[in-house]
Image (cartoon, rainbow, N blue to C red):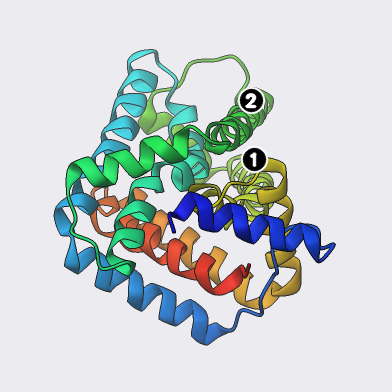
Amino acid sequence: MTKAATNKAKKAETSRRGEIGPEVLPVTYNDILAAIAAGLRDFRAAPLYGLAFAGIYALGGWILIILLLHFDLPFLVYPLAAGFALIGPFIATGFYAVSDLLEQEKTLSWGGVLGAVREAGGRDLGWMALVTGFSLIIWMDIAALLSFGFLGMKSMSATELINYIFTTPSGWLFLLIGNGVGAVIALAVFSFSVVSFPMLYDREVDFVTAMVTSVKVVVANPRPMIVWCVIIALLTGLSLLSGLLGLFAVLPVLGHASWHLYRRAVGT
């Protein structure tokens, strides 16, 4: 039976039982560690795919940062770099495909991986990407408003901006409020996207069902999922400090691990 037929059978069985959406399973701290270990194993098994997909993501980040500096908008570089992680789950679709094929013990090929990604893109994955992209736009708008509120309309070089933020009380307040607002938005996006993207890759479901299921997973397992969110934030932060070079290792491991965590968190 093909994956599409299997998914349809699961969906029909779920409807027959009168349940709304897939079953949400308990997630433990050991599941988080096991997912990370599995992600590292998948990256080591297929490093070229991981490096290629991570390279696309990093290249996009570098281009956007260069454009902001070119247009004299250094105050948006950090918010963009931090907010860019909001669309990470969509970019990670390639990692889901690799992990899925490895899980099924199928031979990896670029045709097979890209074909699986293309097939998933024909479902509601694109709508989910639109939701997270819109979240990034909202975050950038808020970052711009906070910047104008604290910095005014005057132009600052990158050096002047750094000196202002780290040597003045208003700069510290700006940093505190900005990071606080960013954390709230990031937590909200994490809640509705943590398993929705791998779920949309894997199953014939609509994006609303996937988002609701993702939130249910977080609500049912708040502490382990918050730990997972913090791990993602810390590793992403370290990658940003490395000039996005750390993404070549961090993104593949997190992408593969997200697939394995989804498989542990969502039942039929």
> Toward the viewer: 21 or 210?
21
The residue at which mark 1 appears reads as 170
Q: Is residue 109 visible in this depiction of the protein?
A: yes
Q: Image point 51% across, 37% down: which residue? A: 79
The location of residue 241, given as percent across then percent down, is 33, 51
Q: Which residue is mark 2?
A: 141
Which residue is rendered at x = 31% and y = 39% of the image? 115
Whether residue 55 sits left or right of residue 228 in the image: it is left
Give me the residue at 68% from left, 45% from top.
Answer: 181
Image quadrant holding the N terminus, namely: bottom left
Identity of the residue furthest to the bottom in this view = 30
Q: Give the image location of residue 267, x and y in percent.
A: 62, 70
Q: How many numbered circles are shown? A: 2
Q: Position of residue 189 (x, y in %)?
A: 64, 47
The residue closer to the viewer here, 198 or 81, is: 198
Q: Is residue 34 above or below residue 102?
A: below
State the residue in front, 126 or 52: 126
Q: Viewer-proximal residue, 245 or 88?
A: 88
Q: Is residue 163 visible?
A: no
Which element type, helix, strand or loop, lies under badge 2?
helix
Q: Judge from the rendering whether residue 78 lies leftward or rightward of residue 154; answer left or right.
A: left
- Dot 1 amino acid type: Ser
Residue at the farthest front position: 1
Q: Amino acid at mark 2?
A: Asp
